[in-house]
Amino acid sequence: MISLSRSSFLNNTGISGSGSYSISRVQRKGPVSVRVVALGSNGRAGEGNAAVLVEKNKLKEMREESESPSSSSALIDDVDSKPTVAGGVQDVYGEDSATEDQFVTPWSVSVASGYSLLRDPHHNKGLAFTIRERDAHFLRGLLPPTVASHDLQVKKMMHNIRQYQVPLQKYMAMMDLQERNQRLFYKLLIENVEELLPIVYTPTVGEACQKYGSIFMRPQGLFISLKEKGKILEVLRNWPEKNIQVIVVTDGERILGLGDLGCQGMGIPVGKLSLYTALGGIRPSACLPITIDVGTNNEKLLNDEFYIGLRQRRATGQEYAELLDEFMMAVKQNYGEKVLIQFEDFANHNAFDLLAKYGTTHLVFNDDIQGTASVVLAGLVAGQKLVGGTLADHRFLFLGAGEAGTGIAELIALEMSKQTNAPLEETRKKIWLVDSKGLIVSSRKESLQQFKKPWAHEHEPIKELVDAVKAIRPTVLIGTSGVGRTFTKEVVEAMASINEKPIILALSNPTSQSECTAEEAYTWSQGRAIFASGSPFPPVEYDGKVFVPGQANNAYIFPGLGLGLIMSGAIRVHDDMLLAASEALAAQVSQENFDRGLIYPPFTNIRKISAHIAANVAAKAYELGLATRLPEPKDLVKYAESCMYSPAYRNYRDSS
């Protein structure tokens, strides 16, 4: 290593800074690397000073004597940047003088201060940099003279976002902010969660996925396609963050209720992980969104010139299974046993198989199957305060028998079994499902997919939903069909004729796919329905009374569940953890909420809610012997709160 004086460093690199510097040469075949590191007064690199990494593919021929550590002058000459007449520096990289058909090396000088600091979303504070920080980190002149507080920045951003009339424009503004100033993005989202949740998540994220190719600006997350087969571990290592705790992965085949969006499904993992941080307090650097691109069967996308994915039909069978298996093994090898892998928006035929296959070997969770089930169960448990009785007193009818419908049904049956000590086979008989062919009954059993067979009960075949309502006489009607307006006036009126307070949950996303609107549910039931939906609906006034519809949003559950798994060091997800999450959420519904007809608490308290869910989940992990972080904290709620990421700006050291 060769020591440099401050003046030598400035003369030879054109970079200002304080303290002393050292320069080392790395020997390797191919590109030659020169590393310049700023040392603080305590001799430690990178603390409040500039840190520089200079790489060049082909420097001038190194003199033979530069091989000796004592020949510092020869090495310094190699990065000499002589001033030009124009006042700039000589094109030492050969990049500007190269012709278009010549190869150049994309090398850069990155400094932990100055201009590049303003373009680092992890550390940028914009106008919130103090005068002292601007002096210490070479920001003088790069910002206007005003110093703005974090709170004022939030106020300004909300003012700007509210100027947009189109939700997709608001979404794009939020994504742009996330790429510019991460802490401002999360403070904005946390403090305005009820207003911004529909923008960064459903329903707007659905439109964003549909148009992802057109609005694509900067890549977020990792794209792993069939072209990366055999190299997935190498691809994972390209991601700059190494300490990953949560991965949300999709293959884009069943995005919300919108179908196969292929590679453009990336909006879902990005949005989900934003909520993991904002609502559950998981560090942004610990979150990794991934899209596995195996092609798409969406002809419109295949013919769209702006589509960003593979232009081929979806891979299936062995080719698909091998790619997923390589991915799962690579994740475990790279990030360890305790990384949480959340499957998102896989089609039914893959979702159940993947959960069953990797549930015993990895820490995996399917939000569509398990997260939806947990949040719906929480609403039903809370709803007993409004209708009386217990879960076992109810009869349930589902429209939709896919991963969401059967996942919810199974968790309800498990909770009833737990409450009554009745066998699971018995509690399942209180739950009926309708699919595209009608009521699922035992006479159809041979032709049913495996995950539907437990719900094939003895009954005459029924084709229409309204006839099923009249025959089964359910107290709870749940829609997971992905088909809009299927809870018709006739269906809702039939539910209202059977029940004093019918529970109607229209869960399909986005809003356009909801089985009915809040207004329809309240109007057709004469204001007696207890209603919740998957996407948000505005309050409804009926007969002089204002009804506030609840939102059975998975965002209530998965951030807290993930935090609980991480803080306990859990190595597997158990069904009892999902029940624990449901019970914790139901317990957070206050009497004031019940008085307004709500079966879910407001999102304004979501971080507190997530802390209680995390504590319940962690307690269950310790109870089941699945936790690895020992000893168990005495107060799990306080511990969960202490683990949560804060978006408050950090104060940066100066050079003194």
Image: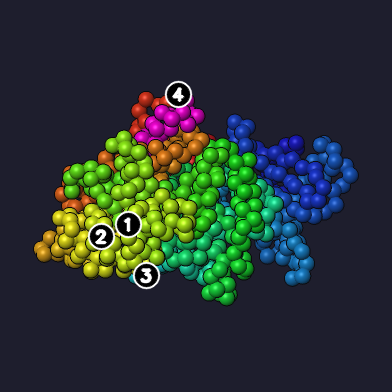
Magenta segment range?
Answer: 607-631
Between the C-alphas of marks 2 and 4, the distance is: 54 Å
Please give the residue where the numbered disc 3 appears in the rendered image. Answer: 166
- Residue that lies at the very extreme toward the left in this rendered image: 544
Q: Nearer the viewer, mark 1 or mark 2?
A: 1
Look at the numbered disc 4 and give the secondary structure of its residue: loop
Which label sits on residue 471?
Answer: 2
Please give the residue where the numbered disc 4 appears in the rendered image. Answer: 631
Please give the residue where the numbered disc 1 appears in the rendered image. Answer: 459
Say which residue appears at 67% left-offset and 61% top-offset.
87
Percent position of residue 173, x then y: 43, 63
Residue 318 is drawn in which quadrant?
A: bottom right
Query: Would you say the magenta stretch is mainly helix, strand or loop?
Result: helix
Give the amino acid type for the residue marked by disc 2 in the picture.
Ala
Q: Are marks 1 and 2 in contact (CB under 8 Å)?
A: yes
Which residue occupies the foreground of this view, 82 or 112?
A: 112
Q: Nearer the viewer, mark 1 or mark 4?
A: 1
